[in-house]
Amino acid sequence: TVGASGAIFGVLAATLVAASPAAAVPSDTTPIACDSCDGWNAPHAPFRLHGDSYYVGVEGISAVLIATPDGLILLDGGLPQSVAPISANIRALGFRVEDIQWILVSHAHYDHVGGVAAFARLSGGKVGASVAGARALRAGAPPSDDPQGTPPYDVPFPAVKAVVEIADGGTI
């Protein structure tokens, strides 16, 4: 059994570790757990799709990088835990995350937008989405009228406060 002094030491140690800045994980990279997440997030080598567009996603979740003369565009950001492998794929192609000017989203489900807040923070790029997508990103949850907004797809994700709303047919 642990004596009173051992129990007190354990509580103090746990408190110090929890309060330690090194132990803090940014909320925009805290992994989301799901039955498929580990398989989706398995490594996948980046490759050229066509012209100046590249697949930079992980095994089961696509992310596409488009190189333009005005900077990089990232389409979708995967899960929060996808940020590191997607960033590594971007670097492996000779690009820099810091050169991403826009992060655009296909739809506001956790497996496609979970990493968007982190990419916005890391790159300083603007986040763009449809009006409904922007509302969901700001809330950190899929839209209430989403036909797939029921379990297992109703998982919250890191919110993105600054989102540019892009109307149908709009340009960036």
Image (cartoon, rainbow, N blue to C red):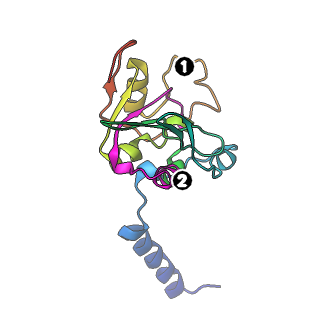
The residue labelled by disc 2 is 85
Image quadrant where residue 131 sits: top left
Residue drawn at the location 57% of the way across and 31% of the way down: 154
Q: Is residue 34 above or below residue 13?
A: above
Q: Which residues are magenta?
A: 86-110
Q: Please name which of the two marks, 2 or 1, marks the residue nearer to the observer.
A: 2
Q: Position of residue 27 (x, y in %)?
A: 42, 51
Q: Closer to the camera, 75 or 12?
A: 75
Q: Position of residue 159 (x, y in %)?
A: 40, 38
Q: Residue at x 36, y 68 (%)?
A: 21
Q: Give the residue displayed 40% in from the left and 55% down from the top.
A: 26
Foreground pick, 93 / 58:
93
Query: Does the magenta portion include 104?
Result: yes
Q: Amino acid at mark 2?
A: Pro
Q: Tell me the quadrant of the picture where the N terminus can be found.
A: bottom right
Q: Provide residue 127's location: percent of width, then percent of height.
A: 35, 33
CA gap, disc 2 and disc 1: 28 Å
Question: Which residue is more in the foreground, 64 or 149?
Answer: 64
Q: Amino acid at mark 1?
A: Asp
Residue 130 is situated, as x and y percent measured from the top left of the image, at 40, 20
Q: Which mark is residue 146?
A: 1
* Foreground residue among 75 and 142: 75
Name the residue located 36 percent from the left edge and 28 percent from the top edge: 128
Image quarter (top left, top right, bottom left or bottom right) of the C terminus? top left
Q: Dot 1, crowdedness within 10 Å: few (<14), some or many (≥20)?
A: some
Contact between marks 2 and 1 (CB within 8 A): the answer is: no
Compare marks 2 and 1 and give the one earlier in the sequence. 2
Q: Quadrant of residue 150?
A: top right
The answer to which image quadrant residue 171 occupies is top left
Mark 2 element type: helix
